[in-house]
Image: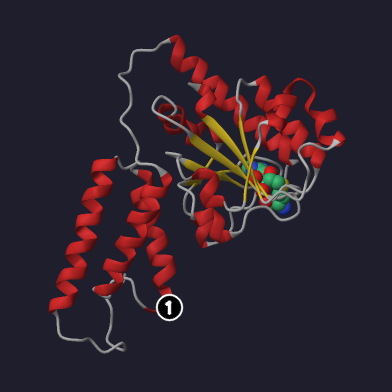
Amino acid sequence: MIANTRVVLVRPHYAGNVGSVARVMKNFGLNQLTLVSPYADPLSDEARRMSTHGENLLTNAKIVDTFEEAVADCQLVFATSANVEGLYRGSHYGRPDEVLPVFVDSLQTGPSALVFGPEPHGLANAEIAQCHGLIRIITDHEYSSLNLSMAVGICLYELRRQFAQRTANYQTPPSRQIANYASQEEMFRHLRHGLEAIHYVWGTKADLLFHGIRQLIARSNPTPVEVRMLHGLARQMEWVAAQLPPKADDQPSGGE
Ligand code: SAH
């Protein structure tokens, strides 16, 4: 069901953009709009004017304080950005047509989210690292950053195109259930704790190393049963670490 797609706008600044996003969502058959700590008022005249027939999306928009609240019940959570430089972004991004097939699959079993950043600076590294993947729309390198609502429009066009193709030759069995965002987060926290306990995630590179492990697991779209299995792994590491004699912090770690 395409309506299982949630569009999350993180700290949007301009009401006109929020209105345009509502409109283009309506064009593509979507109705779940969530705003995280918006500066723009979705009920302002400017937002309503730009939304035209999408006005009901503005009135029903969910406003939350944190990114985690916006996506807690989602299966897949994909960020978007023009900027794919650096270690947190460069390793795992793709074009909408490359990244969206797995997203379209997930819509059969529940909500999944596309996350868009604030107009001035986009999403922060920490926010991108919290997502399961990153979408970059190809643009000219001289000026790569699109207007927010245009970026939403391009992603939704590709989503709708793939969805239509999928339903036209629908033969595949229903896809497996992916564990929701909140339960994956809980598992990642537990796993990190276990990996720290055995000094695998350790020292100055700890965050980056865990980012790599997190992306690896997230790419496999774990089911609730697999998430439970990873909790078991974390518990076992904690248990083994508790049996070992204390280790001095300056000893080399196995973290690479
Ligand atoms: N200078 C910021 C501009 C943000 S534009 C940046 O480069 O990220 C607002 C939002 O639109 C971005 O946070 C992102 O969600 C989306 N966006 C803009 N250009 C994009 C592109 N080329 N590919 C993917 N998303 C894009």
Taking the spot 33% from the left edge, 26% from the top edge, the residue there is: 175
Q: Which quarter of the rendering shows the C terminus?
A: bottom left
Taking the spot 66% from the left edge, 27% from the top edge, the residue there is: 25
The x, y position of residue 26, in whole percent, is: 67, 22
Residue reaching furthest left?
A: 243
Residue placed under numbered mark 1 in the picture: 204
Q: Is residue 99 left or right of residue 220?
A: right
The x, y position of residue 97, in whole percent, is: 52, 31
Above or below, comparing residue 126 to residue 251 in the picture: above
Above or below, comparing residue 216 to residue 3 in the picture: below
Mark 1 lies on a secondary structure that is helix
Q: Is residue 226 left or right of residue 42?
A: left
**Depth order, front residue of 29/254:** 29
Q: Is residue 164 left or right of residue 60?
A: left
Above or below, comparing residue 119 to residue 165 in the picture: below
Occupied quadrant, residue 137: top right
Taking the spot 20% from the left edge, 58% from the top edge, the residue there is: 233
**Depth order, front residue of 37/216:** 37
The x, y position of residue 228, in whole percent, is: 24, 49
The residue type indicated by label 1 comes to Thr
